[in-house]
Image (cartoon, coloured by chain):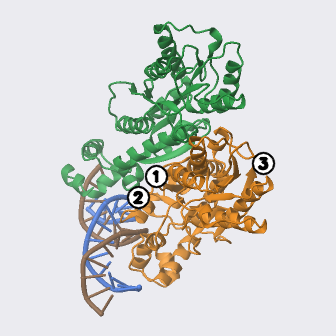
Chain colours: A green, B orange, C blue, D brown
Amino acid sequence: MATIARAAGVSVATVSKVVNGRSDVAPQTRARVRELLLQHDYIAPVFRHSEAAASPTIEVQFAGDLKSYSAEALEGIMDAADDLGASVVTSKASLTTNWARDLVAAGRRALIAVTSVYTAAHLDALDRAGLPLVVLDPLHLPHSRVNSVGATNFAGGLAATQHLLSLGHRRVGYVGGPAMAVCNQARMHGYRAAMEAAGAPVPTDYIRPGEFKYQAGLRSAGALLDLDEPPTAIFAGNDEIAFGVIEAARTRGLRIPEDLSVVGFDDTLLARMASPPLTTVRQPIREMGSVALRTALRLANGEKIESHHIELATELVTRASTAPCR
Amino acid sequence: MATIARAAGVSVATVSKVVNGRSDVAPQTRARVRELLLQHDYIAPVFRHSEAAASPTIEVQFAGDLKSYSAEALEGIMDAADDLGASVVTSKASLTTNWARDLVAAGRRALIAVTSVYTAAHLDALDRAGLPLVVLDPLHLPHSRVNSVGATNFAGGLAATQHLLSLGHRRVGYVGGPAMAVCNQARMHGYRAAMEAAGAPVPTDYIRPGEFKYQAGLRSAGALLDLDEPPTAIFAGNDEIAFGVIEAARTRGLRIPEDLSVVGFDDTLLARMASPPLTTVRQPIREMGSVALRTALRLANGEKIESHHIELATELVTRASTAPCR
DNA sequence: CTGAAAGCGCTTACAG
DNA sequence: CTGAAAGCGCTTACAG
């Protein structure tokens, strides 16, 4: 404040008055001082040591349960935050009336949503509050208003299915997630593209959309396996579904991989711990979390982001749940 | 601060030192001043007008990877924080020089450590900074200096083993966690107590301490199953170990539960998704997280806690990984 | 380990 | 309108 006073050719007292918006200052003096305050990045003492200035706080909101997937994403987010000196506040998404403004008032500089769903009204509220948003693994089509981080789902679905085809399977089913979710659509179309390219027919009841959940996998796979011409291999929309598929096979006396090959998607920590260990398409979930945090911080600093959607590469990890078709 | 100084019979300088967690204050003086600060609801100037006063921020630190266990604990913590209007900051434990003071400076009101290990020096630093600590699932013996939340591990180990005995198993092995971890010791002694009460012998090589990890379970169970007189049932120190045990059995051509019964511990979400679904001892992990947060907030408000260690009840959940001994 | 004293960054009542 | 001066609430280097 002393520096500003000197530069403006006024006393410290006058600068203080300008900072505090008192009325007894000449308009020209006020303007000159204000200009210098901005030039010098003056921060009021109340905020000087507050987190907001030193270490920006990013809110991470989860929809529903913290699955293995969200936990790994959070790890990536925490790692990057650690590197960049940011703090991470976690919460369940609870989109109340003053939600966005409350977050800003609490000092949050950006919001990362993990697999959450926002309506246009939510986006408007964020816009008004000036809170940048990054969506991790968007369930809906990447909107140009929203920055998002995802994975190459189509390529992953293609790779998973090609792997099964290369093992000699021709009757391959797909047990997927919500029909409306873009990531599910991309995986499913990757599957379709591989099947078509190989000239393998896809009966309509071989494709089962549902939910990214164990119970859904159990149910859908049961229906698939009870068909007159059941598949010899199943590509599951994510690992959790794959475990449901495996359990459906087990309760029918089918062995994995001898009687049924199963491929998952995600490669969360669970995949390695399954019995047999699960062949799956790895998403670099931690890296996706890190990218989301970096993007959030850049937005918080007012930077422009070149691309509003970033996709990281998936990779097939072959383990013991797939085998040649007999 | 002057008021506090007068009431405590010390100088303002000394009060300032206590507030800032400096080391050059006698423990009794520190305690007396701290008491008065709480009584007078003293708030550091930085936070006086900030949100931090209204909505307290609790730091949750994790040691190592965010397993299914820590993720569920975090859910319980977030749920309780939501109810009580607190914010939750998550980070990996990185115990640098000014660690404790930095946390206070960043506005944290209490610290929850999930399965972390602290030395006496860390506890001293926390004491000096005036930051209350709650340990969730303490790895070491609950110290009277530390508030902690755990589960009835002995009772759980007893119940798991009695379940196996009631199915006719006499040769029951234990594949556990770190020999030094109290929770592991309690589970192991529960196992021993049940075996002794049933008059079932426990050969020394039937008890295998190790780590709470899949790989450790895989290795130890392999050694157990390769014995001349292998067990017909294995009690695993946690679910992750149990999955290693199951995989060790599978690679030896043993079926679960026909050839080997397996019981886990924790009942994380994974247990339900295993194939076959895992019989395990449920820890109420979410509730434990909620209790930890409530305790942390009470400590942050200067309340005295009656008991420095709280144990919540465990419960056996019978699924399909255990069957009568043939 | 303690506190007197100097100092920092700011605010405000008041004289001009 | 302006600023010298007193003051507030806090911190810190340093002497004891």
Residue A126 in sight here = yes
Q: Secondary structure at mark 2?
A: loop
Q: Secondary structure at mark 3?
A: loop
The answer to whether dots 1 and 2 both sit on one chain is: yes
* Disc 3: CA contacts within 10 A as few (<14), some (14-19) or many (>=20): some
Picture disc at residue B68:
none
CA distance for labels 2 and 3: 47 Å
The reply, left or right, for residue B283 in relation to residue B112 is right
The reply, left or right, for residue B323 in relation to residue B36 is right
The reply, left or right, for residue B41 in relation to residue A132 is right
**Three-letter code, disc 3:** Pro
| Residue picked out by circle 1 | B91
Q: Secondary structure at mark 1?
A: strand
Marks 2 and 3, the one that precedes in the sequence: 2
Which residue shows up at 35% across the image and 66% down it?
B97
**Three-letter code, disc 1:** Ser
Residue A85 in sight here = no
Measured as percent of width and height from the top left, residue B8 is found at: 51, 82
Q: How many marks?
A: 3
Q: Quadrant of the N terminus of chain A?
A: bottom left
In depth, the one of A193 and B147 nearer the eye is: A193
Relative to residue A44, is residue B3 depicted above or below? below
Measured as percent of width and height from the top left, residue A129 is found at: 48, 34
Mark 1 touches mark 3? (CB < 8 Å): no
| Residue picked out by circle 2 | B94
In depth, the one of A207 and B150 nearer the eye is: A207
Measured as percent of width and height from the top left, residue A101 is found at: 52, 38
Q: Quadrant of the C terminus of chain A?
A: top right
Q: Chain of mark 2?
A: B
Picture disc at residue B324:
3
